[in-house]
Amino acid sequence: MTYILWLPLFFGFAFSNGLYYEYSYTTTGKGMEIRGVTRLYLQPTGKTRFETDVLHGRSPRVVPATVVLGDMASPGESTALFEDTKTYVVNRLSAVSGHDAAVVTLAGREKVDGYDCVHARITTTRMVGERRVLDTLDVWKSADVPAVASGQDWMDRVVSPGLSGVEARLRQMGCDGVLVALELRTPTAHTRQDLVKASRRDMSDALFQIPSGYTQRHQDY
């Protein structure tokens, strides 16, 4: 999913020292080309805010603009904000259906984007109609990037949302720490994401809250 950046006014009365990560990404496929920047804000308490800014896009489908809030105390739940309609949707993640068990392999140690990383590969197969297709996800993680415990948990769930046992297997292989790069290949698209910035900064608590005046709506599907 792709989301367009929305920056709220800083009205918060409380601030905390958190971690900020910025990634560049490119997604290409038949009739599709999307480039942009994703931004992740993490509080030591486990509150998260995820934004995506589409810098260039050519796609047959229009994706709604959102910001996604989360809390590691409720890892299977997130809240998407829609500025244009002043609404929000609560998403609840369940196990990925239609996938065979993931195969996780260690690809080795590599220098990526200036960081010493452990490279792992996750492959899954799924049914598309009557055809079985292969998805391949390569991840590069590094312990050299500043992190907090809540950030590590968040990274794990981004890499393997709903795929049972993948997080534990990655850690056993030493593929631990902050996500530095990600590459996803499916039969219809290719996505590459790279870490371009990591820093500590003061963050308003309001960044992690549903803005006043927003109303809840249900998913359209």
Image (cartoon, rainbow, N blue to C red):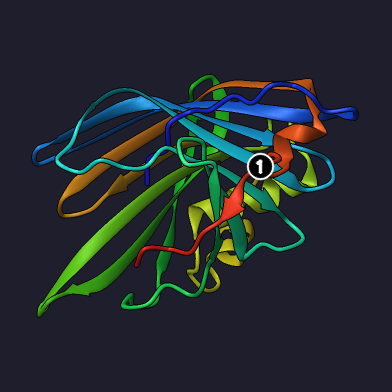
Question: Residue 139, image x and y in percent?
Answer: 45, 45
Q: Which of the pair 122/190 is nearer the observer?
A: 190
Identify which residue is drawn at 72% across, 40% down.
208
Question: Residue 4, image x and y in percent?
Answer: 43, 31
Quarter holding the C terminus is bottom left
User: Relative to 90, is 26 above or below?
Assistant: above
User: Relative to 210, is 53 above or below?
Assistant: above
Q: Which of the pair 41/151 is nearer the observer?
A: 41
Is there any visible trace of residue 65 in the rendered image?
A: yes
Identify which residue is drawn at 31% across, 78% down.
98
Is there any visible trace of residue 178 in the rendered image?
A: no
Identify which residue is drawn at 41% across, 33% down.
193
Does residue 129 appear left or right of residue 98 in this picture?
A: left
Q: Residues within 10 Å of mark 1 (few under 14, many from 20)?
A: few
Q: Name the residue under label 1.
A: 213
Instruction: Please tell me in which quadrant of the rendered image residue 198 appears.
Output: top right
User: Label 1 is placed on what type of residue?
Assistant: Gly
Instruction: Please tell me in which quadrant of the rendered image residue 122 appears.
Output: bottom left
SS for tag 1?
loop
